[in-house]
Image (cartoon, helix red, strand yellow):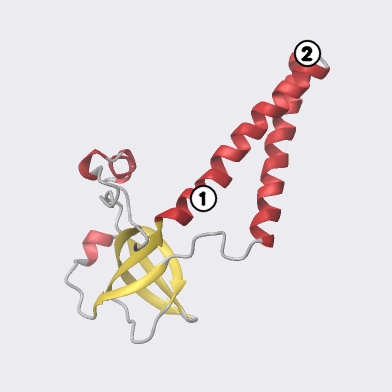
Amino acid sequence: MSAHLIEHRGIVQRIEGGKAIVAMETAGCSSCGQGGNCGIGKMASGRAATLLSLPATANLKAGDVVCITLPQSRLTLSALLGYLFPAFAMLLGAGLGATLQGSDAATAVGGIAGFLGALAIARVVIGLIPGLLPAPQLIPVSNQSNASQQEFHHER
């Protein structure tokens, strides 16, 4: 069974120092089945393209169309570690603050301490477990650009 990938199209803007600066389209990716109903795609529509700096593969040049892929399972794990864990830790800290002191100030301090503690723990875990963060792959689609530069316009 092959891993599910999230894919976005992009166009190489330039190559500098072994890194490809890729303008990624801002429309929804439609890899999750939501297609045009994707809230992220709707929020991003009409915005300037997002620039990514990724390791350049051989024979890549400005104007090449590329596919940026990311394993869906890695993204899910990162989302849990980056969003869900701090939220639960904040609630736990707020609950402990309210239980131990019973005041609103203690509840707020406990919530802040839980949130910041979760961020620190997540940073340590990411450092200790190699490969935990998702690493996007850059796959050339073609060496001739069939996408207009206007499609991936990015204002600096």
30 to 93, vertically: above or below: below
98 to 149, vertically: above or below: above
Residue 35, percent from left and from top: 22, 45
Are there few (<14), some (14-19), or many (20+) residues within 10 Å of tag 1? Answer: some
Between circles 2 and 1, the one closer to the viewer is 1
Residue type beneath disc 2: Ser
Foreground of the two, 54 or 6: 6
Q: Earlier in the sequence, mark 2 or mark 1?
A: 1
Is there a contact, CB below 8 Å, between mark 2 and mark 1? no
Q: Along the horizontal axis of the image, is 73 left or right of 127?
A: left
Would you name the residue on which mark 1 appears? 77
Instruction: Tell me the quarter of the picture where residue 25 sits.
Output: bottom left
The residue located at (28%, 48%) in the rendering is 28
**Quadrant containing the C terminus in the rendered view:** bottom left
Residue 67, percent from left and from top: 30, 67
Residue type beneath disc 1: Leu
Q: Secondary structure at mark 2?
A: loop
Residue 85, percent from left and from top: 60, 39
Residue that protrudes farthest toward the right in the picture: 101
Measured Cα–Cα span from mark 2 to mark 1: 35 Å
Would you name the residue on which mark 2 appears? 103
**Quadrant containing the N terminus in the rendered view:** bottom left
Q: Secondary structure at mark 1?
A: helix
**Which disc number belongs to residue 95?**
none
128 to 107, vertically: above or below: below
The residue located at (67%, 53%) in the rendering is 123
Q: Along the horizontal axis of the image, is 145 left or right of 127?
A: left
Are there few (<14), some (14-19), or many (20+) residues within 10 Å of tag 2? Answer: few
145 to 106, vertically: above or below: below
Residue that protrudes farthest toward the top in the picture: 102
The residue located at (32%, 40%) in the rendering is 43
